[in-house]
Amino acid sequence: MKNAIFTRLLLTTSGLALALAAFFFMKDTNVQAATDIDTAANPLLAEWVGPYGGVPPFDKVKVADFKPAIEAGMAESLAEIDKIAGNTAAPTFDNTIAALERAGHKLDRVLTIYYIWGANMATPDYQVVQREMAPKLAAFNDKINQNEALFKRIEAVYNSPEKAKLNAEQQRLVWVHYTNFVRSGAKLSAEKKARLAEINQQLAGLFTKFGQNLLAEENGQWVVLKDGSDMAGLSQSLRDAAAAAAVAKKVEGAAGIIINTRSSVDPFLTYSDRRDLREKVWKMFINRGDNPNEFNNNATITEILQLRAERAKLLGYETHAHWRLENAMAKTPERTMELMETVWPAAIARVKEEVADMQAFADKEGANITIEPWDYRYYMEKVRKQKFDLDQNEVKPYLQLDKIRDAMFFVAGELFNFTFSPVTNAPVFHPDVTVWGVKNKITGKHVGLWYFDPYARDGKRSGAWMNAYRSQQRMDGKDITTIVSNNSNFVKGKPGEPVLISWDDASTMFHEFGHALHGLSSNVTYPTLSGTAVARDYVEFPSQLLEHWLSTPEVLQKYAVHYQTGKPIPQELVDKIERASTFNQGFATTEYLSSALIDMKLHLAGDKKIDPVKFEKETLARSSLGV
């Protein structure tokens, strides 16, 4: 068996590409002054109006409005900051910390919609604006973080004996503002601040380039399925989804296509009998950002690493990893590495056993192959059926996307007393998006809005995530409710037919909904502390907890019903799912852990110039994965 199998089994990105962007990504924002703009001429600048305390004006958004709206919002925010910094009164919590909480709301509204467009509707004209504005936003942020007069006022409140008289939330808020300013270079010399600002602007441009390159390859690549023989092994629902994707991409003369997103790739790799096509699909997905074309991200990664290392030194940290983890629960890279390296040997041992099981199965059926990465999910499914008599194709007919959404609402009602009702009077940014009003079912009080955007499209980044469009807060006697969203990338099937998803997909939906519930459950005074604005690694706890409610009898018997018969999932099938719940955990663990380990070691390398591809191979070799 080839040692290379273990490295290439990791179906993430081109190895380290997404790990770099995900685990250590810092959204560097900063900008310049702008001219006054009439809010009637640019609706992005206006207060949100309508029901539920106002809603985002998605129906009025034009890409051409983003740049002037951002520039106007930045100019107003800087004026507000200057007013706070120039206050001649002695610094207090109210005239400094609370004043900061009141500032910048116009820009917040603009950037909320701007970033929604970037994640979900990144058209070519939007990407032009994105490339221009990224470094300007970075410069804007540094103008605030490096405002000496402002920081002196924050520091005075932080060190004041009066701080002890503040309530717990206020003390936390003071600590957050002070710590964020220090970590952003507020205490540096003028010379170092200037260099830091240059680095932040360069990084902002590189992050934008990285993301746009990745999106280009996800949107612009697919594998064509010419006829029925190319679909051998696929269920009817997967065939319908492939055919629908071909229509959406305007690919003529094809029975279907497999688009370059995980929701399309994973099922094909699991069920397709065509090994040659599995290899093409796997390579298409794994090589995003690593192909010999204009979208290759390797040089960008090298430059990001160099700049992050330099920035960390400027800020007084050994490496970017030390800076990034300081205010997380782990605190240090050493503790983080200790945890991961404790788990790693057992995970590697298990994945080797899993591959051996697959090889034995392939040998028994006379396949005459050596298991390769594109075979893993295919034979994983065969071994699962052999060991547990569980075929995931038996499960999917009971997991309808809309029904799982309703199951999430049911759980939210049982655990949090929330009710969800469709909303038809709120604009959306795409026809696929639906909006739901959330109330407390005991008091009837409005809690917030939940936007749901489930389907893949050109211009939408891959994966699944939660966003907050508006933070819950109670400052100055107001009672502002939150607006949250869940976004994913399911592939639509045949018109009029339900979208059937896998058990893993359903679990992911519950996970991301856990983040939304975190936001909906927010009960704070100050927006900076609202919702998921907690320690970065803690934010995953509520979501991981919520996943466990998917498998409860109350949920399965009512919502896991066959899309044709309406009958609930048989208990016998539920028992099989439970017995197989720890199946394939070697692969599942190494898939995420290898990315995290490589990412940590990339950043712990400091200012060493790195060839990402070579570094990944060498690191995995030393980690007993092989190359």
Image (cartoon, helix red, strand yellow):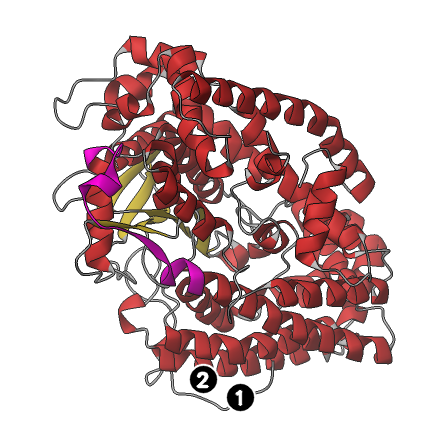
Task: Tell whether position 233 is magenta.
Answer: yes
The residue that mark 2 highlights is 68
Where is residue 130 shown, x and y percent of the image? 49, 74
- Given contact means CB atoms under 8 Å apart, are the residues at marks 1 and 2 in contact? yes
Q: Is residue 201 left or right of residue 578?
A: right
Q: Is residue 575 left or right of residue 311?
A: left
The residue that mark 1 highlights is 34
Q: Secondary structure at mark 1?
A: loop
* Disc 2 residue type (three-letter): Pro
Where is residue 328 shown, x and y percent of the image? 71, 44
* Disc 1 residue type (three-letter): Ala
Q: Which mark is residue 140?
A: none
Q: Nearer the viewer, residue 549 or 475?
A: 549
Looking at the image, the residue that sits furthest to the bottom is: 35
Tell me if I can see residue 595 in this picture: yes
Report the number of numbered marks. 2
Where is residue 43 shown, x and y percent of the image? 34, 77
